[in-house]
Amino acid sequence: MQKGVVDFITLGCSKNLVDAERVMRQLEAAGWRCVHDPKEPKGEVCVINTCGFIGDAKEESINMILQMAERKKAGKLRKLIVMGCLSERYRAELEAELPEVDEYYGKFDFENMVDGLKNQNTPINQNTRNYERHLTTPSHYAYLKISEGCNRMCSYCAIPLITGRHTSRPKEEILAEVRWLVGQGVKELNVIAQDLSSYGLDLEKRHLLPELVDEMAQIEGMEWIRLHYAYPTDFPEELLDVMAKHQNVCKYLDIALQHCTDHMLGLMRRHITRAEQDALIQKIRERVPGICIRTTLLVGHPGETEEDFEELKAWVKAMRFERMGCFAYSNEEGTYAYKHYEDTIPQEVKDRRVEQLMDIQQAISAELMAEKVGTIQRVIIDRQEGDYWIGRTQYDSPEVDCEVLVENIGHLSLVIGNFYDVKITKAEEFDLYGDIC
């Protein structure tokens, strides 16, 4: 057991990761040494940052808590702390069922952890600003969370139950953080929120995302800005002009569409029609030529018929999304669907639908990737792995999208975090291969 060391284990999404990075920075200012996702935890304190979105994520969080509780029983851990979405949603239940945990924090009080772990003999560095973080990503990219919460109340989604109402961060605070991140060597920002489309509505009753991204793009040293988790209803179309205008705003938009039939969009409480959704996608592609659209679809929601699913398959084939993910409906307590619908679709049917959609997408992806052969792409290098340097284009977000593999022939000397022009020589369904120009 290493004294003065806190091990952080982060589960779930990149928004959770940002929260962990903020707490780690504050604890380091208070004299602790923080280690993120250690292969073998050795610190005297362990903080588990949990996810409570769907059943599988909750199970993973519980299993990790139990695993660290066993370490504590064995005398290998002095203090076990749980924070994040699971404890925000189920704190009372967790306290009753898992008394081995010393302290629970949620989504909005986790900074109090610093006071609880304060070392009276170590003065706190008062110069640490609240947006500063201990970056756990490679030094050339980071995530930037611009708001918290969601007002949409889709039928299936537990996020508003966990995060509460949508709350935008002040624009000037975000821009100050961007400048600080650039000063730390960050070249690529992945902008995240539960709902990017609503940014600013609670501050000035108008969409501020286009203005924010425009100002971010003008910060010297900011090479790539990539946008995640937009919502199609009430989408701020002025953003498209900003994306087309700035070369350092990646031609990439992550916009979760979930389904295509009016029947299912209504049951899901998406407040949009098939025609409106299709028109938006067409407008995005027309106004930002060459854009890569990433979307997520949900199958097995109560009420989804075979006819709905067949129409969804045909729609996916017609839309030819550059990037697509799919997940099966999870019946989450407290949601509108849990209260008002019956979860009657068998799990094996849900899983089959996911598999069928992803098979369709795999074929589409293979065709779209093959079109890249012979082109020259600007690639950022993330790491070296075996006989290859691994990088990404502007159309690929870290960890979730495609990669570009450059063979390390003749001990090719590349610098991680630098950009290179790469001629694409080969394509697979989800990866590209190329040579440095």
Image (spheres, helix red, strand yellow):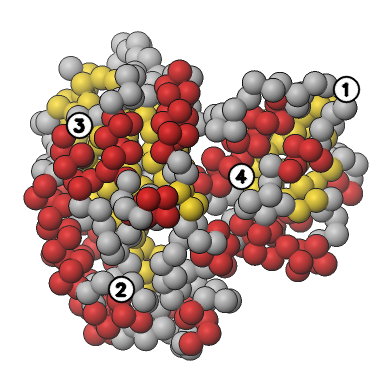
Residue type at the position of mark 3: His
Circle 1 packing at 10 Å, graded few (<14), some (14-19), many (20+), is few
At x 76% / y 66%, what residue is drawn?
A: 92
Q: Secondary structure at mark 3?
A: loop
Which residue bears the numbered disc 1? 121
Marks 1,4: beta carbons within 8 A = no
Which mark is drawn over residue 246? 3
Real-space Cα separation, disc 1 to disc 4, in angstroms: 28 Å
Evaluate whether residue 383 shows in this view: no
Real-space Cα separation, disc 4 to disc 3, in angstroms: 34 Å
* Quadrant where the image shows the C terminus: top left
Q: Position of residue 65 (x, y in %)?
A: 73, 54
Which mark is drawn over residue 10? 4
Which residue bears the numbered disc 2? 271
Q: Position of residue 105 (x, y in %)?
A: 72, 52
| Nearer-N-terminus badge (3/1) | 1
> Where is 311 relative to 393, above or below?
below
Marks 4,2: beta carbons within 8 A = no
